Image (cartoon, rainbow, N blue to C red):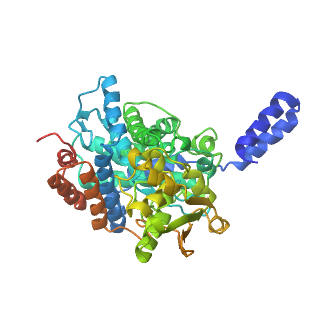
Amino acid sequence: MIRRDFGKTLLSIVAFSGVPRLARGVVAETQRSFPEVHGLTDYVARFVIETQYQAIPNDVLELGKKSILDGFGLALAGSRAQSAPLCLRYLDTLGIRDGKSTIIGSARKTAPQFAAFVNGVSIHADDYDDTQLSAAKDRVYGLLVHPTVPVLPAAFAIAEQGGISGKEFMLAYHLGVEVECKIAEAISPRHYQDGFHSSGTCGPLGSAAACARLMHLDVTKTLNAFGVAAAESGGLGENFGTMTKPFQAGHAAESGFEAAQLAAIGWTAAKQILEAKRGFFHAFGGSFEPAYIMDRLGKPWTFASPGVSLKPYPSGSLSHPAMTEMMRLIEKNNIVASQVEKVDLGANSNMMAALIHHHPQTGLEAKFSMEFCLAILLLERKAGLGQFTNQVVLRSDVQEMIAKVNYYVDPEAEQAGFDKMTSILRIHLKNGEVISGRAEFGKGSPADPMSFEEAAVKFRGCGEYAEWPKEKTENIIAFVKNLENAPDLRELAPMLSSEKA
């Protein structure tokens, strides 16, 4: 019996059975099942304030640069998403038109809290941002967090206020990513399986960690920031395929920033918010695995193991192994759409639970549709930002090809474990030939990583999509490539703004 049902049973016993001894026994059993780990939140806070730049291995720093570049590029691309003008209208309703923080991809500036929000929405708008891998078979790959989106916008909003070097920025970014990823890995898998969007729930804690470090908060204030950030955590998987999924990510960035600011001026919160029986892990997951976080921060760093994936396509990460394999088979066998009778794609049940739109009608729904992702590759041999639009999704040839894709739970894929994205592909041609393939990871994963130059190619594509000046695009790439030598992050802001210098 899962904890939620257990709780319902307990309430029924207390309210209706009139058997207090039995109720006391149920309470005792419930308490025993939750790990008692004293000092966990304190350990996380001390890691944030005590870790030095020199403690981060060079390979981890280089991996982080790729994700930082990726995040800024996606903010540019996302500034052209349908949600972007709505975000600006929202700021207008708040009467916020002045500030020092850049709304990336525009000439607008606003208060740093709201810049963190809008830039976070933009980074996640196209669902093209990086993804945390899983370390255990019951921790679902692709359903943990998008590491960069809650942390980068909040850290950049603070850095724009001045006095933050490239090394300080990189340190804060890595601390934030490490905290949110280890929290996401530790929480019970039920958290994801029951519908929480972990970038929205775990993300605020990563954002708060990065902001606390940049603001030089002490242990007590960092603990308070975590308490506030946990109180603001939220996000539901049912919103996948709508504007509210990127809202949840942007809100995570904003919430961590807000939490650190409140803590800095003396706001108080619970000091044991992670491990308490009325705290984050219990409320959001029912339980957690202490061994995945206690004394594990930076041992190893998540970027090193199990790693972080950069997305080759602007769609849910669980679609990428199948898409990578589909493109390989298309090119190897010179398959054209008119030859295809049907396509079978077998996957595990958790992939099915995330890629939920089997008959997509919008570009946002298509990002969470395995059927569309395979269909568009067969039709156009590409699946970039220009393909995930309402107009393309509703084309008659696209809808007809979507109907030919059979997406189902395959026992072999299920048996392989949820830490993989096992995708078993069979393309049935009209002449009777069946072309088969299998993949567990896609391009951009540690199994097939992007180089910095490949990440730069993706960045250039985002810049082109945003109609960004090529000179600024190249300057951003060069700046991030040498980020550790930057004396002040404010130098980057004009490159990300359309305001003329």
Coordinates of residue 378 in the picture (x, y in percent):
44, 63
How many marks can you see? 0
The residue lying toward the viewer, choosing from 238 and 362, is 362
Task: Point out residue 447 in the picture as x, y percentages from the top left corner.
Answer: 45, 71
Return the residue nearer the eye: 326 or 395. 395
Query: Observer-nearest residue: 98 or 487?
Result: 98
Q: Is residue 17 above or below residue 312?
A: above
Observer able to see residue 273: no
x and y, in percent, of residue 251 in the image: 42, 38
From what the image shows, is residue 61 above or below residue 177?
Answer: below
Question: Is residue 112 found left or right of 497 in the rendered image?
Answer: right
- As drawn, is 313 to the left or to the right of 5? left
Q: Quadrant of residue 452?
A: bottom left
Q: Which residue appears at 87% of the width and 36% of the height?
A: 21
On the image, the x and y values in percent for residue 47 come to 44, 53
Residue 153 occupies which quadrant of the picture?
top left
| Residue 195 visible in the picture | yes
Q: Is 43 situated left or right of 392 in this image?
A: right
Q: Residue at x 88, y 31 (%)?
A: 17
Q: Is residue 12 left or right of residue 52?
A: right
Q: Is residue 77 above or below residue 445?
A: above
297 to 357, vertically: above or below = below
* Quadrant the C terminus occupies: top left
